[in-house]
Amino acid sequence: MNRMASALVFLPIVMAVPAWAGDADIKAAQSSIDAQIRAFLANDNARAYSYAAPGIQRIFPTVDAFMGMVERAYQPVWHPKSHTFGKAEENSATSVTQHVLVVGPDGKDYEAIYTLELQPDGIFRITSVSLQASNTVGA
């Protein structure tokens, strides 16, 4: 009976670990997104570039090339008036998708959907961003 009681007490603790690990991964991914946006706002282009995953850095091999793309195609996340984290999903032990609600420099609402992958150095880096106008921000 004592063994059975111990097993029942232990089981919920073991089952809680994956949920906690996922929450930690999501927080770490959010931290990377937030740090990149803050770097954009501070015009710290090298720091902003450091949050791009290696695959993105291969496509845009210099900070200037990367920033040119960001400034042309991603104005709302380059210089947002505000940003708020929305829905997040842990796709695997090393991949997170994070929705970010953004008020762009034009005052319009956007939704940016980030994917991030955990790198060997322990940091989640951004592998893609999909940006669209949003009429549902705050809804």
Image: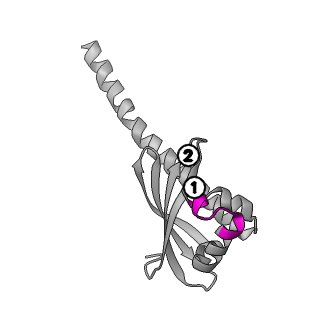
Residue farthest along the top direction in this orientation: 2
Left or right relative to 69: residue 96:
left
Depth order, front residue of 121/64: 64
Secondary structure under the numbered disc 2 in the rendered image: loop
Depth order, front residue of 15/76: 76
**On-image quarter of the C terminus:** bottom left
Q: Residue at x 67, y 61 (%)?
A: 49
Answer whether residue 2 is visible to the viewer in this image: yes
- C-beta proximity under 8 Å, tags 1 and 2: yes
Left or right relative to 136: residue 35:
right
* Residue 116 on the magenta span: no
Q: Residue at x 58, y 54 (%)?
A: 54
Count of numbered labels shown in the rendering: 2
Query: Is residue 117 depicted above or below 105 in this figure?
Result: above
Quadrant assignment, res 105: bottom right
Rounded to the nearest angstrom, the CA distance separating label 1 from label 2 is 8 Å
Q: Which mark identifies residue 119? A: 2
- Residue type for callout 2: Gln
Residue 136 placement (x, y as % from top left)? 43, 78
Answer whether residue 80 is visible to the viewer in this image: no
- Residue type for callout 1: Ala
Residue 81 placement (x, y as % from top left)? 64, 76
**On-image quarter of the N terminus:** top left
Quadrant assignment, res 45: bottom right
Quadrant assignment, res 125: bottom right
Query: Is residue 35 depicted above or below 73 in this figure?
Result: above
Give the magenta part as a residue range: 56-65
Q: Residue at x 60, y 55 (%)?
A: 32
Name the residue beneath numbered marker 1.
53
How would you classify the magenta stretch by its main secondary structure?
Answer: helix
Q: Residue at x 59, y 59 (%)?
A: 58
Q: Which one is earlier in the sequence, the residue at label 1 or at label 2?
A: 1
